[in-house]
Image (spheres, grey):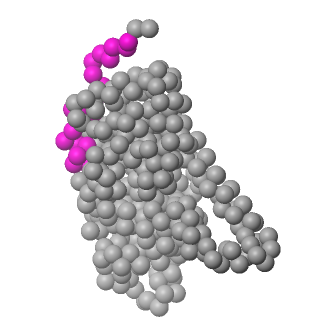
């Protein structure tokens, strides 16, 4: 398995990306192609006591870097020798099995869509992070790639999310929920109501396991394995979860530091606190999968350290070997919007 890594993408690049790649090569048995400024990559390797890349690692030089200030829609064209553009072209040409970047989300999505291309028949690629929930995590699809969606987009998101939950998370017959303001079929806007009908029909045909509408609270409790949403609502849901988790962690820290007794209590429950922090740590998962692209692309968090990059590479390898893209391709006929969707008359 060969994973292409954007060595220059992210706040801590190239150090974190190179060190994370080294750890992945040692611990996971994967091969890694580091794309970026060769001299800077070699400097990081020298700091690790290496004069050249170890077995299982190679460097492909790319002189430019896509910066956060660059126009995400055109950066890959304007900087043809950037680590992002060169890396995705390597993926397109079959020089690797998956691509990982901690760089600009918008630039990565635009470049992946136009260089690697979407799977034929998929209307929009989706960002599908695994968010912490009461059942060990759920796939949220979409979390921001497409703000305004159609029922067909959400139907395809549901199928793709279901395949990802089954293949990568190991959930047989994953439960798919449509993010909404209530459980009743009549809830939500016309988008949610029409999508509900499509997902209900797919469930009746045995194509996926639709659990109905799911409110944000129930989704966090673990009611479903896949949370389907338009990118606008999904991004708000995701950022609210992140903010709430950070707020709770901060308040717990303040509480345990209050006095000697609370500090002693913190020692007694230190194992539980570490587990809590681990659940909330995005670096444990590694990154966000772009599903709907014809080859595996993983977006690592911009602030990823070497541990997060290592896990993003692991996630990319699992994605590449999972068969998800084949599942989507083989089932495209069931993921298209019917010619007519009849709405129930009031």
* Residue 135 visible in image: yes
Magenta run includes residue 328: yes
Query: Residue at 28% of width from left, 38% of height from top?
Result: 208
Q: Does residue 107 appear left or right of residue 55 in this picture?
A: right
Query: Residue at 45% of width from left, 62% of height from top?
Result: 285
Give x and y (percent) for residue 110: 45, 45
Q: Does residue 238 appear left or right of residue 178 in this picture?
A: right
Nearer to me, 142 or 216? 216
Q: Quadrant of residue 28?
A: bottom left
Q: Quadrant of residue 5?
A: bottom left
Instruction: Give the position of the C terminus as an image quadrant.
Output: top left
Give x and y (percent) for residue 69: 61, 52
Instruction: Give the vertical position of 34 relative to 99 (above or below).
Output: below
Outermost residue, right side: 259
Instruction: Give the vertical position of 195 relative to 225 (above or below).
Output: above
Give x and y (percent) for residue 255: 74, 65
Q: Quadrant of residue 158?
A: top left
Numbered circles on residues, count: 0
Nearer to me, 140 or 257? 257
* Residue 295 visible in image: no
Query: Residue at 52% of width from left, 87% of height from top?
Result: 47
Outermost residue, top side: 346
Nearer to me, 114 or 264? 264
Instruction: Give the position of the N terminus as an image quadrant.
Output: bottom left
Magenta run includes residue 62: no
Which residues are the magenta region?
325-344
Instruction: Give the vertical position of 19 relative to 339 (above or below).
Output: below
Give x and y (percent) for residue 251: 72, 60
């Amino acid at each position: 398995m060969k994973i292409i890594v954007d060595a220059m993408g992210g706040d801590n690049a190239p150090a974190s990306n190179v060190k994370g790649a080294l750890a992945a090569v040692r611990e996971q048995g994967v091969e890694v192609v580091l794309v970026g400024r060769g001299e800077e990559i070699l400097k990081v390797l020298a700091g690790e006591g290496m004069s050249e890349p170890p077995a299982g690692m190679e460097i492909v030089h790319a002189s430019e870097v896509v910066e956060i200030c660059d126009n995400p829609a055109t950066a890959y064209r304007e900087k043809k020798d950037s680590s992002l553009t060169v890396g995705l072209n390597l993926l397109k040409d079959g020089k690797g099995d998956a691509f990982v970047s901690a760089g600009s989300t918008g630039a990565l999505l635009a470049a992946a869509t136009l260089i690697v291309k979407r799977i034929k028949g998929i209307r929009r690629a989706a960002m599908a992070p695994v968010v912490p929930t009461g059942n060990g995590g759920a796939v949220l699809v979409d979390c921001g790639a497409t703000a305004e969606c159609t029922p067909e987009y959400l139907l395809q998101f549901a199928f793709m999310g279901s395949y990802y939950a089954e293949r990568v998370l190991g959930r047989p017959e994953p439960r798919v929920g449509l993010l909404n303001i209530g459980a009743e079929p009549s809830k939500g806007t016309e988008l949610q109501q029409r999508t509900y009908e499509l997902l209900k029909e797919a469930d009746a045909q045995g194509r996926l396991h639709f659990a109905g509408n799911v409110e944000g609270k129930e989704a966090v409790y673990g009611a479903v394995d896949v949370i389907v949403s338009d990118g606008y609502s999904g991004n708000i849901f995701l950022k609210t979860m992140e903010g709430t988790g950070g707020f709770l962690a901060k308040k717990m820290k303040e509480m345990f530091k209050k006095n000697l007794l609370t500090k002693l209590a913190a020692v007694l429950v230190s194992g539980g606190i570490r587990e809590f922090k681990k659940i909330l740590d995005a670096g444990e998962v590694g990154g966000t999968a772009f599903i709907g692209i014809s080859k595996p692309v993983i977006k690592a968090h911009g602030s990823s350290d070497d541990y997060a990059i290592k896990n993003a590479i692991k996630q990319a390898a699992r994605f590449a070997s999972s068969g998800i893209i084949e599942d989507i391709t083989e089932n495209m006929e069931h993921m298209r919007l019917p010619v007519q969707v009849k709405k129930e008359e009031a």
